[in-house]
Image (spheres, grey):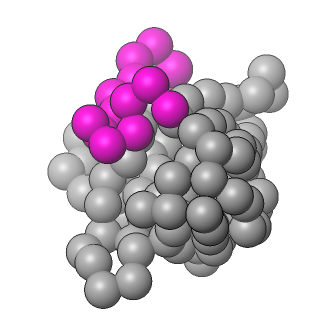
């Protein structure tokens, strides 16, 4: 069982920045790819970014390329999503998720954190 917990959501104005964090159990970085998703009101869940379990590769959705950055801290127990140049359409509930080696789905999810961007 891998329990994840997001933090750092809040309300900002257009053009502002937020940094989301995802707290993970010790050693998670070596066993799981860590992804970020969001779900806006009335829309389907959307993939945003992923950092591979070895930390050597990243992939971003087109909607956030150049604005969002996924990373981990030096202890590799906490994962981040730095969000810059925020827009009203970024308003959503944001989730971190973990995908184990050899698996096709993200099997562990956090509870979500709210992000609201106003003009």
User: What is the total number of numbered labels drawn onto the structure image?
Assistant: 0
Q: Is residue 21 above or below residue 74?
A: below
**Which percent across, then down, holds residue 40?**
40, 74
Q: Is residue 47 above or below residue 33?
A: below
Residue sitting at x 58%, y 39%: 85
**Which percent across, then down, holds residue 13?**
69, 58
Residue 97 seen from this side: no
Quarter of the image where one finds residue 59: top left
What's drawn in magenta, residue-wise? 53-67
Q: Is residue 57 magenta?
A: yes
Q: Residue most toward the top?
A: 56
Residue sitting at x 51%, y 53%: 87
Nearest the viewer among 69 and 72 is: 69
Quarter of the image where one finds residue 69: top right
**Which percent across, then down, holds residue 83?**
60, 41
Q: Main secondary structure of the magenta part?
A: loop
């Amino acid at each position: 069982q891998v329990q994840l917990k997001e933090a750092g959501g809040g309300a900002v104005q257009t053009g502002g920045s937020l940094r989301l964090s995802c707290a993970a159990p010790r050693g998670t970085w070596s066993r799981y790819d860590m992804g970020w998703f969001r779900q806006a009101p009335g829309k389907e869940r959307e993939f945003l970014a992923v950092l591979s379990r070895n930390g050597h590769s990243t992939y971003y959705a087109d909607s956030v390329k150049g604005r969002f950055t996924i990373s981990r801290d030096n202890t590799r127990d906490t994962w981040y999503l730095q969000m810059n140049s925020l827009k009203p359409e970024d308003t959503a509930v944001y989730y971190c998720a973990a995908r184990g080696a050899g698996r096709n789905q993200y099997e562990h999810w956090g509870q979500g954190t709210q992000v609201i961007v106003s003009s």
